[in-house]
Amino acid sequence: MSTHSLDASGAGGSDTPNLDFDGTTPYEDYVQADVLTHLQHPRSDDPGEMVFLVTTQVMELWFTVIVHEWETAARALREDRIDVAMDALKRSVRELDALNASWRPLAQLTPGQFNSYRAALGEGSGFQSAMYRRMEFLLGEKSASMLVPHRGAPRVHAELEKALHEPSLYDEVLRLLARRGLAVPQAVLERDLSQRYEPSPEVEAVWSALYTDPGTHDELVRLGEALTDVAELVWRWRNDHLVATRRAMGAKTGTGGSAGVSWLEKRAQKNVFPELWTARSHV
Ligand code: HEM
């Protein structure tokens, strides 16, 4: 990023970067790199803990961007601005790719390496990630009980509670399909938004009709494909997490208190936007 003063064409400035600033650099004022790079406080002496901590922080940042994109997409769909929604969804697909690539430094941890700092994590677990939970809520995987761990953090709790009661990204998609004259059942449109989305045979029939005859609603089929990209990459994140966990700790119980790998296996089996997958059998 250049902090030169440029005219509208990008010309101007001198040959070398500015060195003189009254206070902190404009870069720092924008990026807050000083804050960001002093948020790493390993809890053990193990040199391998740093990358575990930073990878987790990097993933939290990607979760934050992706939540932003999906909230943008949901709002745009509500306003019938499909082009804006598609742009946000496509950005999120590339961000999910980057998120998934950040498994690389942790993907081959041995149990011995993980044990070197595991005890230092105490009862801390990614299960307690509020931003991940907001991603899941936006995908329709709602659950009031997931607010319980955050009772002691008012801002986080309030954001999660709001997200619990708002329409998910998929709810907004189904409302749009209904506005376009497609036979989404009233019960689906008026469902209790704070509950997990349950697949509906009628919604499956809507998607299979769209995919069978894409000519009439090509824009909606493109939307369906963007959502399928999102679903696939979320599934890949869950599976990469599962395999990394299996390598690092076998069948031991998790620091968050779950059965560990067997619990994660069940989570990874859940289909994101379920009818977009099952409809394919009928096209
Ligand atoms: C190789 C290192 C890792 C291991 C061994 C591991 C292990 C586990 C285990 C066993 C669980 C189940 C809950 C529990 O009992 O703790 C879990 C959940 C979770 N972990 Fe990890 N984890 C690792 C890395 C990460 C990283 C880097 C993140 C990034 C934020 C993360 C995010 C999550 C999330 C979001 C959940 C909840 C999943 C859900 O609700 O379906 N994990 N992890």
Image (tube, rainbow, N blue to C red):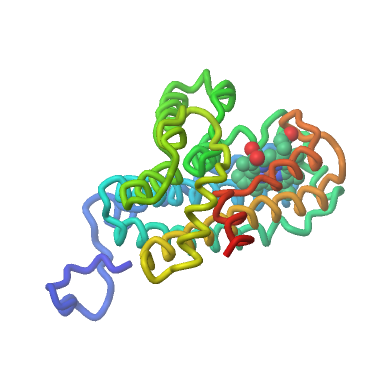
Q: Using the image, determine if residue 148 lies above or below residue 39.
A: above
- Residue 245 falls left or right of residue 25: right
Q: Tell me residue 131's x, y (percent).
A: 50, 39
Residue at horizontal 30 percent and vertical 45 percent from the top = 78
Q: Tell me residue 249's x, y (percent).
A: 83, 45
Q: Which residue is more in the foreground, 229 or 208?
A: 208
| Any part of residue 140 in sight | yes
Q: Using the image, determine if residue 240 lies above or below residue 9.
A: above
- Residue 267 falls left or right of residue 205: right
| Image-quarter location of ligand 1 | top right
Residue at horizontal 22 percent and vertical 69 percent from the top = 4
Query: Which quadrant: the N terminus?
Result: bottom left
- Residue 123 falls left or right of residue 158: right
- Residue 144 falls left or right of residue 106: left
Q: Which residue is more in the foreground, 37 or 226?
A: 226
The residue most toward the left is 7
Residue at horizontal 31 percent and vertical 58 percent from the top = 82
Q: Tell me residue 111's x, y (percent).
A: 85, 48
